[in-house]
Image (tube, rainbow, N blue to C red):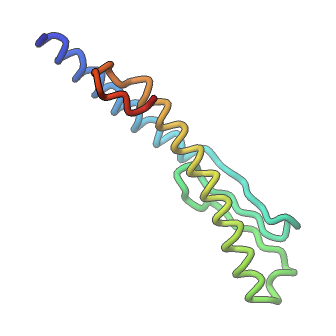
Amino acid sequence: MFGDMMNMMGKLKETQKKIEDTKKRLDTVLIDEKSNDDLLKITITANRKIKSISISDDLLNDKEQLEDYLILTLNKAIERATQVNETELAAVAKEGMPNIPGMDLFK
């Protein structure tokens, strides 16, 4: 029993390390999002850090339109980044979780 407990603790520590490594790797995963007409382009990491924003000169003349484009396009980029982030982290967590009865959280 004690050996099983030590084995589970080791597996949990290993999984924690893999999760940290995955978080670092997600900083390098870039997601590009753009408006439907390509007037605004945003690049964001899978950890939801904005890397670049490219704005067409056409948008610079209309403040309200630019604000609307930023909100819509940033929200789409954040949503995609969140999906990638959660999928990657869940896969690592599920892979490394010990089989504890009643603790099947990642099924």
Decide which of 66, 57 is in the foreground and name it: 66
Could you tell me residue 50's position as x and y percent? 59, 62
Reply above or below: 31 against 21. Answer: below
The quadrant holding residue 13 is top left
Q: From the viewer's perspective, tell me whether residue 73 is left or right of residue 104.
A: right
Decide which of 30, 78 is in the foreground and name it: 78
The quadrant holding residue 79 is bottom right
Quarter of the figure that contains the N terminus: top left
User: What residue lies at 56% left-to-right and 51% top-to-bottom?
Assistant: 82
Reply above or below: 75 against 60. Answer: above
Decide which of 39, 57 is in the foreground and name it: 39
Reply above or below: 99 against 21. Answer: above
Could you tell me residue 41's position as x and y percent? 76, 64
User: What residue lies at 33% left-to-right and 25% top-to-bottom?
Assistant: 14
Could you tell me residue 66's position as x and y percent? 75, 81
Q: From the viewer's perspective, tell me whether residue 49 is left or right of residue 33.
A: left
User: What residue lies at 70% left-to-right and 70% top-to-bottom?
Assistant: 72
Q: From the viewer's perspective, tell me whether residue 54 is left or right of residue 104.
A: right
User: What residue lies at 44% left-to-right and 23% top-to-bottom?
Assistant: 95
> Which residue is at the far front?
102
Q: From the viewer's perspective, tell me whether residue 30 is left or right of residue 10.
A: right
Could you tell me residue 32's position as x and y percent? 72, 54
Q: Could you tell me how many numbered marks the image carries?
A: 0
